[in-house]
Image (tube, rainbow, N blue to C red):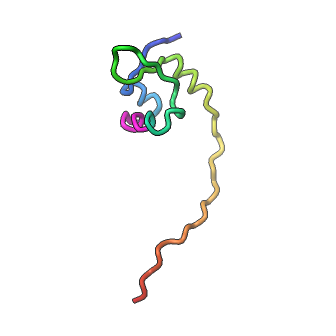
Amino acid sequence: MDDRLLTIATLAPILCLSPGTLRNKLCTDPGSLPPRVKVPGTRGPRWRMSDVQAWLNALPLNCEPDLTIPARRPGRRRKAV
């Protein structure tokens, strides 16, 4: 198994995210990311490559696109002229 440690900069392209988006997800929704490791003496979280691969393999494959049309919300009323 590959136990390299990944930083935010190296994990972001693997997940097809920008590093800024990855940082935002760490704060807002950390459950939507692979499990991370806190290495003493380092800044920021790290991820094991093997954990990332296992997490990606466990994701469900959504082969059918959602083609439902959302209900149209009413917009702002127009001013009477």
> Which residue is at the front of the view, 24 or 19?
24
Q: Quadrant of residue 63?
A: top right
x, y percent for residue 55 = 57, 25
List x then y, in percent, for residue 37.
Answer: 46, 19
Identify the residue at horizontal 66%, vertical 44% (top origin): 64
Report whether 63 appears left or right of 7. Answer: right
Magenta span of residues: 18-24
**For the C terminus, which image quadrant?**
bottom left
Which residue, as the protein is rendered here, is positioned at the far front?
Answer: 40
Residue lying at 34% horizontally and 14% vertically, measured from the top left: 41
* Number of numbered discs: 0
Magenta span includes 38? no
Residue 47 appears at what percent x and percent y? 46, 20
Q: Give the residue at the far top of this rendering.
A: 1
Q: Nearer the viewer, residue 29 or 60?
A: 29
Figure check: 50 above or below 26: above
Is 23 one of the magenta-colored residues? yes
**Residue 9 position by quadrant:** top left
* Residue appearing at x 48%, y 17% in the figure: 48
Prevailing secondary structure class for the magenta stretch in the rendered image = helix
Up-down relation of residue 59 to residue 70 (above or below): above
Q: Residue at horizontal 54%, vertical 33%? A: 31
Residue 40 shown left or right of residue 53 in the figure: left
